[in-house]
Image (spheres, rainbow, N blue to C red):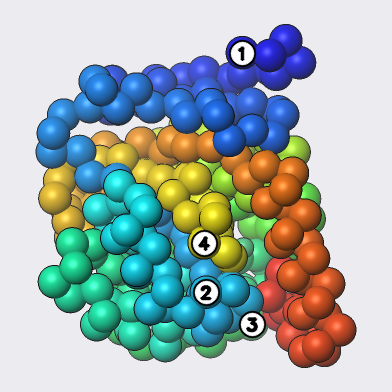
Amino acid sequence: MDQHKTPHESVNAMSQTTLVYCDAPSTDYIVADQSLLPLTTCKADLHLHTTHSDGSCTPIELIDHVVAHTDLHVIAITDHDEISGAHIARDYAQGRGVDVIIGEEISSREGHILAYFIHERIAPGMSARDTIRAIHEQGGLAVAAHPYDWMVRSLGRYGLMQRAAGIQPEWAFDAIETLNSSLFPRYANVTAHQVATRLGLPMIGGSDSHQLRTVGYGYTLYEGRNASDLRTALRHGRTSPAGANWSYTDLAVATGRLVQRVSMAGVSLALRSIGLVS
Ligand SMILES: [Zn+2]
Ligand SMILES: [Zn+2]
């Protein structure tokens, strides 16, 4: 490992998996020794965008890529404030060897919240508490997305540590995203990991991909065979985030797309997509 990298290591409930977070961007420090993982380990990228929000690939292109070029068993489509692409992806994925979770990255007033296993679109602009409640009313799971990202409105700034604590927390999250491959600098993931540990909440990982090249960079490992087993794994706190960060090239491509989007689609939509307005 390079000298300038400052790894933070921890071992969570899946004892075979060691997590290493680095401050330097890299695509080469995959952190889970997969040769040690049980054959029943499921690998899931739980944070993906398509053209139905601000991603560059269609749901069909995303499924074709996952099947042909990754070892992912499960994916979640989590478009900003939209689930139409997730429905298309799930239908198209039938019989293709990958399980699709209907997800949404909801722009709550206090930051982005990931919803999984929902059926209806949840509107942006509500408080985090009401957003979490709406997710649970559909039988879904609510996860704090990149809570310490300094570039977007983030739950960490609004008191995640206090509001998600206790037996009946105001923010009743089911898990925290502690590995988001897009984050610069890396300490945002480290802080999220530390807070999830203190709160005793399960952890997940995802690539936050807006383009095919970064799909699978970040992922969640758990014992099981499909998407529904993720619920069981989260309930027992037996999920393990792992993966690599976007490279500078990936970041440059994403930034270029964002700039293009601002000029083409208008300022308000773009700001909403990155969480600066709701
Ligand atoms: Zn986000
Ligand atoms: Zn996202």
Mark 3: amino acid: Gly
Instruction: Check disc 2: other Cα within 10 Å, few if <14, some if 14-19, many if 20+.
Output: some
Which residue lies under the disc numbered 1?
Answer: 1
Mark 1: amino acid: Met
Q: Residue at x 67, y 66 (%)?
A: 110
Query: Does label 3 or label 2 sit earlier along the sequence?
Result: 2
Query: Does label 2 or label 1 sit earlier along the sequence?
Result: 1
Q: Residue at x 77, y 50 (%)?
A: 150
Mark 2: amino acid: Cys
Q: Residue at x 17, y 75 (%)?
A: 94
Dot 4 and dot 2 residues touching (CB under 8 Å): yes
Query: Does label 4 or label 2 sit earlier along the sequence?
Result: 2
Which residue lies under the disc numbered 4?
Answer: 212
Instruction: Check disc 4: other Cα within 10 Å, few if <14, some if 14-19, many if 20+.
Output: some
Which residue lies under the disc numbered 3?
Answer: 125
Is residue 184 found left or right of 49 in the rendered image? right
Instruction: Give residue 25's quadrant in the image.
Output: top right
Q: Nearer the viewer, mark 1 or mark 4?
A: 4
Mark 4: amino acid: Leu
Image position of 182 with respect to 255: above or below = above
Which residue lies under the disc numbered 2?
Answer: 57
- The residue lying toward the viewer, choosing from 126 and 88, is 88
Q: Residue 32's x, y, as percent?
A: 38, 27
Quarter containing the C terminus: bottom right
- The residue lying toward the viewer, choosing from 238 and 169, is 238
Query: Does label 4 or label 3 sit earlier along the sequence?
Result: 3
